[in-house]
């Protein structure tokens, strides 16, 4: 089984214009000696502006230096993508949209996107909303963090997280794939204004437009989730 572990850096937290992408093709096997990184790529992608430059330290001028070489890296990335069984990103919901812009020809590739943050069970103690940082996971696993917010660095960090779980990795990936493929159920919390804190503490978010407390849960986890709630819920969407 082969995984494409990737990360992107964009010019804005709200858009899908990439200024950098990094990826590693990683093999998972029952034999630990056959488990590990196979090939990696990392390249800047030319852009004319970067509103989050202070965060990722990528200047538009620097990206222009990749003008003559980035396409070859993207070509190799496409080969790696089609060689993989699953594509892994720490925030797959966001990165999958970015990759669609970079690799439009790969939109229909057979690989399933799996979220390293939400689909994998690392044993990390998460908050009710299920979100946490890759750096927090790495530090919890005893992995040193020297730099962040560059695609290749974040990929290497996630690869090392996988390396720390080689003995149980096949089972971890299998369970994560089942979760990734499970439909998403959108729930509405049936709570009064006075008891709204119950919904908030359970990871529900306030939807101001619909004026309801909502949360998305994978269908395969729905029964388990409902057992821990102190209030009723209504299913408002399955997709």
Image (cartoon, grey):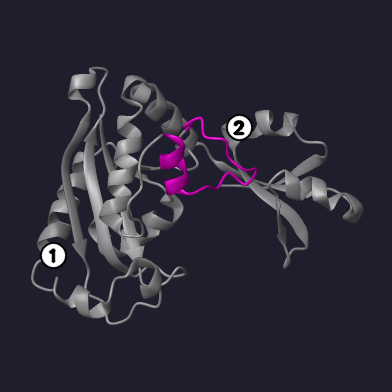
Which of the 4 quarters of the picture holds residue 159? top left
Question: In the image, which residues are magenta?
Answer: 121-141
Q: Is residue 137 left or right of residue 26?
A: right
| Point 8% across, 72% down: residue | 68
Residue 146 vertical position relative to residue 164 in the rendered view, above or below: below
Q: Is residue 77 left or right of residue 11?
A: left
Q: Position of residue 14 (x, y in %)?
A: 47, 69
Q: Label 2 neighbourhood size at 10 Å, few (<14), some (14-19), many (20+)? A: few
The dominant secondary structure in magenta is: loop
Position of 97 relative to 182 (above/below):
below
The residue sitting at 42% across, 50% down in the picture is 92
The image shows residue 27 at horizontal and vertical percentages of 22, 31
Task: Name the spot of residue 87 as percent of width and height, x first.
Answer: 32, 43
Residue displayed at 81% across by 50% down: 197
Image coords of residue 38 (percent x, y): 16, 37
Q: Is residue 70 above or below residue 136?
A: below
In the image, 198 versus 148, the foreground residue is 148
The residue indicated by pointer 1 is: 71
Query: In this orientation, which residue lies closer to the viewer: 90 or 153?
Result: 153
Viewer can see residue 193: yes
* Secondary element type, mark 1: helix
The quadrant of the rendering that contains the N terminus is top left
Which one is nearer the viewer's eye here, 107 or 125?
125
Q: Which residue is mark 2?
A: 221
Q: Residue at x 14, y 74 (%)?
A: 65
Name the mark on residue 208.
none
Between the C-alphas of marks 2 and 1, the distance is 41 Å
Magenta stretch contains residue 132: yes
Residue extending farthest to the top is 31
Q: Residues within 10 Å of mark 1 (few under 14, many from 20)?
A: few
């Amino acid at each position: 089984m082969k995984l494409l572990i990737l990360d992107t850096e964009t010019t804005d937290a709200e858009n899908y214009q990439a200024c950098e992408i990094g990826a590693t093709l990683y093999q998972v096997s029952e034999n630990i000696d056959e488990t590990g990184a196979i090939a990696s790529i990392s390249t800047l992608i030319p852009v004319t502006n970067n509103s989050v430059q202070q965060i990722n330290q990528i200047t538009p001028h620097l990206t222009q230096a990749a003008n003559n070489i980035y396409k070859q890296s993207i070509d190799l990335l496409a080969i790696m993508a089609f060689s993989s069984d699953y594509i892994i990103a720490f925030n797959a919901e966001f990165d999958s949209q970015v990759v669609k812009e970079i690799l439009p020809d790969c939109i229909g590739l057979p690989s399933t996107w799996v979220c390293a943050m939400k689909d994998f069970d690392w044993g990390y103690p998460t908050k009710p909303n299920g979100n946490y940082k890759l750096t927090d996971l790495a530090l919890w696993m005893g992995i040193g963090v020297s730099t962040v917010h560059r695609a290749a660095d974040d990929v290497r960090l996630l690869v090392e997280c996988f390396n720390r779980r080689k003995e149980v990795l096949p089972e971890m990936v299998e369970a994560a794939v089942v979760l990734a493929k499970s439909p998403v159920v959108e729930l509405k919390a049936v709570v009064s204004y006075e008891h709204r804190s119950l919904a908030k503490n359970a990871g529900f978010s306030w939807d101001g437009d619909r004026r309801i407390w909502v949360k998305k849960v994978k269908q395969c986890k729905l029964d388990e989730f409902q057992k821990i709630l102190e209030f009723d819920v209504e299913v408002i969407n399955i997709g």
